[in-house]
Image (cartoon, rainbow, N blue to C red):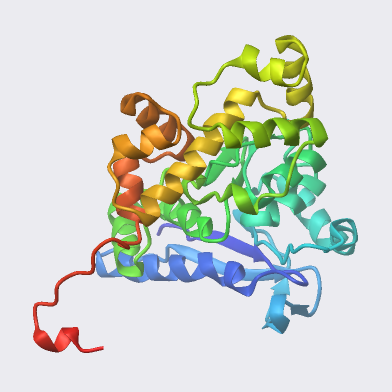
Amino acid sequence: MVTALRVGVLAYQGCFASEVFGVPDLLTMASHIAAADGIRDPCYDVSVLSPRRQVVGAGGAVIAVVPVRRVDVLVVPGFELYPGLDLDATLTALRPEIETIRTSARSGIAVVSICVGAFLLAEAGLLDGRQSTTAWLFAGELARRCPGTDVRPEKLVVTDGGVTTTGAFSAMYDFALGLIREHSGSRVARATARIALVDDARPSQAPYVDLALLPATGRAFSQNVKRRLDRKMCERYDLEQLAGAFHISTRTLLRRFRAETGQTPLEYLHSARVRKAKHLLETTDRTFASIAAEVGYRDSGTFSAVFTRLTGHRPRDYRATFGRNTGRAARPTNPVGAIR
């Protein structure tokens, strides 16, 4: 008899209930699919754990829990992280959960965080010296709080040394499908994804990043440089001319800009161009060459290469996935369909 994989989800005050039950629900579906495929042994033994007797999640959802026990995989969901939240106080109040995470990792249990659950793993010391990811909106804050980790904000799932972190919210399904694929096989994972309408081939969370929602980074100097680059986005990038506009040397410009933002002006310009190109791909039916020219690329091949590198999607694929068909309404095949 095959032993079921023991999966524990660590519930705690303020956690998202959907992230507590999202992975177990998908594993339950996979178990039924495996049974229909002739696998009679139980695949997964799932429990919701807590070092506390009672847990109330985000929005007041009461979550039934059992005491912490030995499992093979411990999943740590995310929580409400909103503007104005005292993150230090929030994490301090979760010391029992953080100690549970630390103890579990030391005993050889695989630990997985969902979304901003990565902040609990960081407090437990699990991310130091490892690559990690989290919700793209809060990746900068994770990197600031835990400088010992190499945050990869474009990644959906990162596993490094027995510790797994995932991107924002729905990335829990990318992790769960990977777990099902590893434990129950590709056939069961594929069928689970199809039945649940979950994409089992997403390469990155980069296409979902909206830089306008990210907190402003840098200080006055870099903000002024960014504004100039934004205004002259369609023009050819000229480092010497840019430095001359601020009456400093190119070396000083690069040093100061990187010190304030962590990137070069050209890297920022590429990201700004791609941000505008994403908007045009989503909202218009303009040709790729036209969009490339508007955002400053004379060669559409270069535009495609930069866009693909920064988003994980080719322009054509991005439009197919995120385009909003604003140009032409589909002609109804039945006259009744024209009635509003």
For image coordinates 42% across by 43% down, the residue present is 203
Identify the residue shown where x is 45% and y is 35%. 295
The x, y position of residue 251, in whole percent, is 73, 10
Considering the image in quadrants, where does the N terminus appear?
bottom left
Q: Position of residue 123 (x, y in %)?
A: 81, 48
Left of 236 or right of it: where is 338?
A: left
Res 42 → quadrant = bottom left
Q: Position of residue 338 (x, y in %)?
A: 18, 84
Q: Is residue 248 left or right of residue 299?
A: right
Q: How many marks?
A: 0
Looking at the image, residue 96 sits to the left or right of residue 35; the answer is right
Seen at 56% across and 71% down, the residue is 21
Q: Quadrant of residue 37?
A: bottom left
Q: In the rendered image, is residue 1 in sight?
A: yes
Q: Is residue 314 visible?
A: no
Quarter in which the C terminus is drawn: bottom left
On the rendered structure, is 266 left or right of 300? right
Vertical placement of 247 versus 65: above or below? above
- Which one is nearer the viewer's eye here, 92 or 246? 246
x 79%, y 40%: residue = 144
Counting from the top left corner in percent of width and height, residue 227 is at: 67, 37
